[in-house]
Amino acid sequence: MELYELTIHEAQELLRKGEISAVELTQAVIERIVEVDNQVKAYLTVTPESALEQAREADRRQAAGEDHSLLGIPLAIKDVICTKGVPTTCGSRILENFIPPYDATVIEQLRQRGAVILGKTNMDEFAMGSSTENSAFFPTRNPWDLSRVPGGSSGGSAAALAADECLGALGSDTGGSVRQPAALCGVVGLKPTYGRVSRYGLVAFASSLDQIGPFGKDVTDCTIMLQAIAHYDARDSTSVDVPAPNYAQALVPDIRGMRVGVPREYFVEGMQPGVETAVRSAIEKMADLGAEVDEVSLPHTEYSLPAYYLIAPAEASANLARYDGVKYGYSHPEVEDVWDAYRQTRQNGFGPEVKRRIMLGTYALSAGYYDAYYLKAQKVRTLIKRDFDQAFGKFDVLVAPTSPTVAFKIGEKVDDPLQMYLSDVFTLSLNLAGICGISIPCGFADGLPVGLQIMGDAFAEEVVLRVAYAYEQSTEWHRRRPEL
Ligand code: GLN
């Protein structure tokens, strides 16, 4: 076995016993990146010298008797999370030369725990998309089939992990951007409850929906990553001051008597038959393990997608107003006056999908349309939240597919925004409701990974992790890796 193939928990053990050093591990992962990233194209920036320096520091801390959960573990970070002194482009031309003067809170937390940051991963521009094809730089490829997308918008992080180009990664999830690429790349991805993880230093897309989440090769790794970043942060006014439990205690392979709901609205016409088969057999497996499985209805599910595509663009149109070519980022040269400067900077700095969202959002917020669109969408959001409240009155978790299809071909959906938006039809509603969810591997369809989504109530990460772990431990899906 190669060092880059290790999980975080396996590497931790070897590091603690002194059988490997952080420098050896980091070196192995950097060599892996050099070997395969010209095919996968998961990274926008790799910082090998800095990574090796961090690894040496981790070895020094270990020698000095320090013991931390991520000491010496090489990780990849989505390029929407600010890293001091390292470019943070958000996959956009407008931030191509932006170098943040500070670390996001999650980066500080990873560093405190001794993590080694390898670099920044590719993404759809400003996290708007489901395939990573909206990156202004290049598309990332799915390690299971290089002619296919890795999902998005955190496609670079998911692909890097699936290709063993890191041991764990961070992404952001506004409508599914951690869970959907995790599903399409055959890894584990978690969207924490809104407010569980600090958004300080996460470049904003839709502030009431955005949440940073971890990717791991298995549920245990995802749990270790979550533990590192789930803290209250006074610098994020939506961070919730609830102490995080010891999530590792939730990892018991026993779900006897747990109540698992299967929302009927999540098994729709048009979903890929192989996806439904894999998910249905995962649900049967849970019943075999002693869970009480029953059907449930979330009646407002069909309104999630339209509500999301009003609320998210509305917030984006406000958040992206800051890219004016004055304070930071791209500034168009040779302009006539201030209005021309704004126009040219934004015209040349943003890609087509970002412009589409800004226009949609501006329209939905404009006088005369606000009540009909934005306000109405907010009311629908409340109904969606109530559906979940009722369901969690009866069930511990809800289970469904993460994505209606497996990884699709590069180019297949780029010209059809609605088809692309439908990739997140099963994930968006969790962001609207602010609750948590995980995607874990549950089989294959047409040779490509299928993800099972396990949804939990707000701050019920422990429950979600327990069910995910019990299922994972009774299967072998998470051990499969693509051939590269
Ligand atoms: N695909 C969805 C969108 O384009 C969700 C993206 C996300 O979660 N960042 O908005």
Image (cartoon, rainbow, N blue to C red):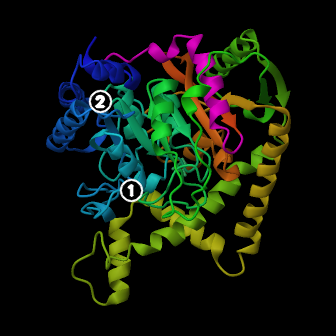
The image position of residue 293, as x and y in percent, is 80, 20
Q: How far apart are marks 2 and 1 (CA)?
A: 22 Å
Is 466 colored magenta in this rendering? yes
Query: Three-letter amino acid code at disc 2?
Result: Glu
The residue located at (31%, 79%) in the rendering is 326
Q: Is 438 above or below relative to 350?
A: above
Query: Three-letter amino acid code at disc 1?
Result: Ala
The residue located at (74%, 69%) in the rendering is 375
* Residue bearing mark 1: 104
Q: Quadrant of the N terminus?
A: top left
Question: On the image, which quarter does residue 314 sit in?
Answer: bottom right
Question: On the image, which quarter does residue 313 sit in?
Answer: bottom right
Q: Is residue 407 visible?
A: no
Question: On the image, which quarter does residue 32 sit in?
Answer: top left
The residue located at (51%, 21%) in the rendering is 449
Please tell me how crowded label 2 is: few (under 14), some (14-19), or many (20+) other residues with Cα within 10 Å.
many
Q: Is residue 55 left or right of residue 209?
A: left
Nearest the eye: 159 or 434: 434
The image position of residue 168, as x and y in percent, is 38, 33
Q: Nearer the viewer, mark 2 or mark 1?
A: 1
Is 356 colored magenta in this rendering? no
The residue located at (81%, 47%) in the rendering is 300
What residue occupies the far left of the structure in this picture? 49
Label whose residue precedes the other's in the sequence (2 or 1): 1
Q: In which quarter of the image is the C terminus?
A: top left
Q: Can residue 215 be seen in this view?
A: yes
Task: Tell me the magenta residue range.
Answer: 457-484
The image position of residue 474, as x and y in percent, is 60, 10
Q: Is mark 1 within 8 Å of ligand 1?
A: no
* Residue bearing mark 2: 165
